[in-house]
Image (spheres, helix red, strand yellow):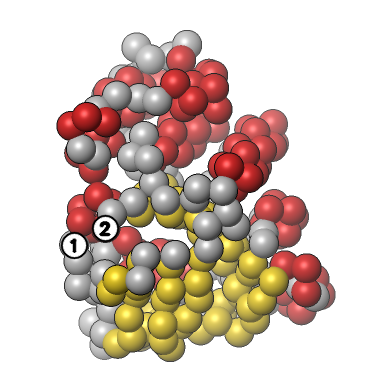
Amino acid sequence: MLQVDNIDLYYGASQALRGVSLSAQLGAVTCIMGRNGVGKTSLLRAIVGQQPIRGGAIRWEEKDVSALPPYERARRGIAYVPQGREIFPLLTVEENLRTAFAATPRKEHYVPDDIYDLFPVLKDMLRRRGGDLSGGQQQQLAIARALVTRPRLLILDEPTEGIQPSIIKDIENIIGILRDRGGMAILLVEQYFEFARDLADEFAVMERGEVVLAGPAREMDEEDVRRYLTV
């Protein structure tokens, strides 16, 4: 589904990614782990088109999308839930969900019922402004908004950041449900090791803009991974 091949990314003269490669498959969760500042978010921004790459290629459904703008990648089934959620605080929950229609054909300009099955709290808050929701509720709204686009690749950047434990468990369950449906690849950046370990089918650990450990989760050596996560 997604194949990232040997990409380089720069911010001015500073190189943020060095020859990074990874893949994400349908029906599987690929977790990217590492300390702050090692390039995890830069990698996601490259995949969704928010930051241009200098070398390598990004292929989605066997087509090179490296030069496509973000909105074209969204229309091709790539959805992004950024770190910090970035919902619209002055729009209602319903209006936030409807902003996802920009990436869908007109015949799909409605919120699927299963969104409210996954996030029942949102159905009770449709008229509330996004900025009035708790951090956990805003995170659920951000994920729900991404799902309104009917993505085939869902990219999540640290969905547990600043979230109360009960909501973290809810989000873990939802990601598991989405994976088990089999119609979506999930790429997850996470620093909370237990959360990533329990969800991952594949993993990649980054250090200084490079992937230093990667493979199937069943072959993961927890001590090796934790060594790259501790400060």
Viewer-side residue, 180 vs 217: 180
Cα gap from disc 2 to disc 1, whole angstroms: 7 Å
Q: Is residue 19 visible?
A: yes
Q: Residue at x 20, y 56 (%)?
A: 72
Q: Is residue 82 visible?
A: no
Tally the numbered discs: 2
Above or below 214: residue 68: above
Q: Residues within 10 Å of mark 2 (few under 14, many from 20)?
A: some
Mark 2 is on which residue type? Arg
Q: Residue 193: name its quadrant.
A: bottom right
- From the viewer's perspective, tell me whether residue 207 is left or right of residue 1: right
Q: Residue 170: name its quadrant.
A: top right
**Label 1 sits on residue:** 69
Question: Is the Cβ of the residue at disc 2 closer than 8 Å to that at disc 1?
Answer: yes
**Label 2 sits on residue:** 73
Above or below 137: residue 208: below
> Circle 1 sits in a helix, a strand or a loop, which is it?
loop
